[in-house]
Image (cartoon, helix red, strand yellow):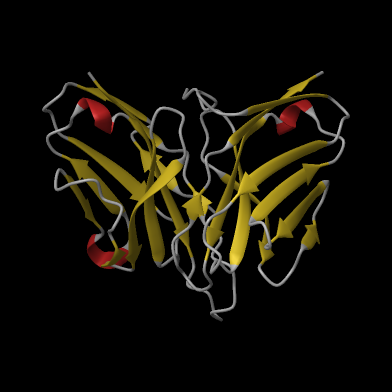
């Protein structure tokens, strides 16, 4: 089974430019999450999709960030315009909807997309 | 790749020693607690989880202890190996498909 794949693995852009990160979740996983880790700190939640719908976007920093998941398959996260503080590693994760609500939500993470804004 | 250990608490052990990594959590309503391991250049990888109605769970070479009274979680790794070197994150969640909230992480360095 293919894991969660993210592209690009590393992107270097200048302040003010636009970057689009892509995530392909595990096939059949309806839950898709975006997380970010900045400067070696903790991993912060950004957004959660259930299929194509945004379930929770409370972690999105501001309106420069736009996430989409058209068709409920892959997802993109666009940063426009990028700022210096957006640098970090952006992780995507996916999970199945649990068959019973008593199950733990075990996320499978991708390797991350490292964004460097100069 | 990413310097995963910058600004993190670090635990240094010798190969073969037992390691204990600690985590304090904040949400007393969380149902599940999960440990993830992140190696440099990779995404976090699931290790073990424990439900809030348990106080101990064992896996292969790993044991997780949960103390709800003081909101404390620990991960014990037996006979630590160089391959265990990574950043370890605890995470908490409610049941269902709710969001994971991660702790700050601890870097484990294992010397041969």
Residue drawn at (26%, 50%) of the image:
A60
| Numbered marks: total | 0
The image quadrant that residue A64 belongs to is: top left
Q: Nearer the viewer, residue A58 or A87?
A: A58
For residue B18, side relative to residue A79 (left or right): right
Report x, y in % for residue A41.
45, 33
Report x, y in % for residue B38.
58, 37
For residue A69, side relative to residue B48 (left or right): left
For residue B111, side relative to residue B52 (left or right): right
Residue drawn at (68%, 43%) of the image:
B22
Would you place residue B19 above or below residue A4 in this image?
Answer: above
Report x, y in % for residue B23.
63, 46
Residue drawn at (52%, 53%) of the image:
A108
Query: Extreme front residue here?
Result: B70
Report x, y in % for residue B111.
78, 19
Residue drawn at (40%, 67%) of the image:
A30
Q: Nearer the viewer, residue A76 or B47?
A: B47
Residue B72 can be seen, yes or no: yes
Would you place residue B41 above or below residue A1 in this image?
Answer: above
Residue A26 can be seen, yes or no: no
Query: Extreme bottom residue here?
Result: A100
The image quadrant that residue B112 belongs to is: top right
For residue A92, side relative to residue A55 (left or right): right
């Amino acid at each position: 089974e293919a894991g969660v794949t993210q592209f690009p693995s590393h992107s270097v852009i200048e302040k003010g430019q636009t970057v689009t990160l892509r995530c392909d979740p595990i096939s059949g996983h309806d839950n898709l999450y975006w997380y970010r880790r900045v400067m070696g700190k903790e991993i912060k939640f950004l957004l959660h999709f259930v299929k194509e719908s945004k379930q929770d976007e409370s972690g999105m920093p501001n309106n420069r960030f736009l996430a989409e998941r058209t068709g409920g398959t892959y997802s993109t996260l666009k940063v426009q315009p990028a700022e210096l503080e957006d640098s970090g590693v952006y992780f995507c994760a996916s999970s199945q909807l649990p068959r019973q609500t008593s199950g733990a939500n075990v996320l499978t993470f991708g390797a991350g997309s490292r964004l460097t804004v100069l | 790749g990413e310097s995963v250990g910058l600004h993190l608490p670090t635990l240094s052990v010798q190969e073969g020693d037992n390691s204990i990594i600690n985590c304090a959590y904040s949400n007393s309503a969380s149902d599940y607690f999960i440990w993830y391991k992140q190696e440099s250049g990779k995404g976090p990888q699931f290790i073990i989880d424990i439900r809030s109605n348990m106080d101990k769970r064992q896996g292969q070479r790993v044991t997780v202890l949960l103390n709800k009274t003081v909101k404390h979680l620990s991960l014990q790794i037996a006979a630590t190996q160089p391959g265990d070197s990574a950043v370890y994150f605890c995470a908490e969640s409610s049941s269902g498909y709710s969001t994971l909230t991660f702790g700050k992480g601890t870097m484990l360095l294992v010397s041969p």
